[in-house]
Image (tube, helix red, strand yellow):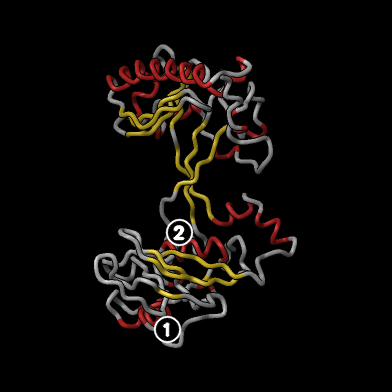
Amino acid sequence: MDEGPPPAALRLGPPPAPPKGVNFRLASRSRHGYLGRNVGAQHLGVRKGEKRESFQKVALGRGAVSAAGSEGPDVSGLQVDPASALAVGSPLGAAGKTVNAVVRLTDAPLAVAYKQAGGMTKEQQQTYVRGLRDKQDALKGQLRGLGARDLASLTKALNAVVVAVDAAKLKEISALPGVTSVQPISDYELDLSDTVPYIGATAVQNSGVDGSGETVAVLDSGIDYTHQDLGGAGTVAAYTAAYGTTTADPKNTTTDGLFPTSKVIGGYDFVGERWPSGPLAPDPDPIDCGTSTIPAPCAGGHGTHVSDIIAGVGPAKGVAPGADRRPRRRDEPLARQQLRPA
């Protein structure tokens, strides 16, 4: 039985020449820069008032399916030129440096083959993918012979394998039979000043819609309501007055007249500072634990980081800076989470 066409994202014909160099995909990946890792104005560990996000870029070679559409911001500055990336003396081509790379094979990925064939049954699709994987497995054997380590295999929108390998081997890999391109994977970090406009939120804010009158609830590791980007003083003194100096400090179990604030309008800690390693100990203070200031077992910061993205009012504004935040705190193993005002 004909299973019908694949999802819309896979119904792709021969790709047009991508405008403005948008011929790669961006995949968000959390890395570092959580608000709450440091106190006061230095929570960010990067530039004051800005939160960094990391993006992993995979450059696609000619004929590949581009995940980026023809609309959107110009991100051509993030492209990696394969020739220069693999050149002797380049940082990515340096011997002894392990890099992750996408190794593309000759055969079309399933999405392209489906379009070219005018459709495939489920069984035909499965047979085609098995053929791709057989050839990938043969290539993987050669790659392992060059010291590469398998990371992933791609068959739907891209026919490729992803490996970790000594950068000095990349040119040798590119010369293997059946390989059409080798693209090192590079990491990029973007600030809220980049990402908020990227998703269109700045345009919405400029139209007069900034979240004012809305309340956002966040279930996460808590919130540092003393942070300057959330309407607080942004000082070490203000933070320690609210949290104390250790996870056992009673200050982090009471609001001390410091909470709620005009920005963070409510919240509750449902689990306390010791759970899951200790008993549940709910309290009315959703203050986040900043790991750069508070010693272990402090494991907070993520809730403040998320809250800033949602409604931060610093130099790099969040998506809805006019919104109020109502946090609640919920701890989980290895990643304590609190729900706090957004």
Residue 252 falls left or right of residue 128 = left
Residue name at image x 40 percent, y 35 percent: 91
**Quarter placement of the N terminus:** top right
Q: Secondary structure at mark 1?
A: loop
The front one of 166 and 232 is 232
Residue name at image x 72 percent, y 61 percent: 206
**Does residue 37 appear anywhere in the picture?**
no
Residue furthest toward the top? Answer: 177
Residue furthest toward the front? Answer: 1
Residue 47 spot, x, y in % from top left: 49, 60
Q: Amino acid at mark 2?
A: Val
Residue 248 spot, x, y in % from top left: 27, 77
Local packing at callout 1 (Cα closer than 10 Å; few below 14, some 14-19, many 20+) is some
Which of the 4 image quadrants contains residue 192?
Answer: bottom right
Q: Circle 2 is placed at which residue position?
A: 46
Mark toward the viewer: 1 or 2: 1
Q: Secondary structure at mark 2?
A: loop
**Distance between the alpha carbons at the discs numbered 1 and 2:** 29 Å
Residue 126 versus residue 338 in the image, above or below? above
Residue 294 spot, x, y in % from top left: 31, 71
Query: Which is more N-terminal, label 2 or label 1?
Result: 2
Residue 155 spot, x, y in % from top left: 47, 25
Residue name at image x 40 percent, y 74 percent: 269
- Disc count in the image? 2
Local packing at callout 2 (Cα closer than 10 Å; few below 14, some 14-19, many 20+) is some
Which of the 4 image quadrants contains residue 117?
Answer: top right
Residue name at image x 33 percent, y 70 percent: 293
Residue 229 versus residue 89 in the image, above or below? below
The front one of 210 and 280 is 280
Residue furthest toward the bottom? Answer: 257
Q: Circle 1 is placed at which residue position?
A: 255
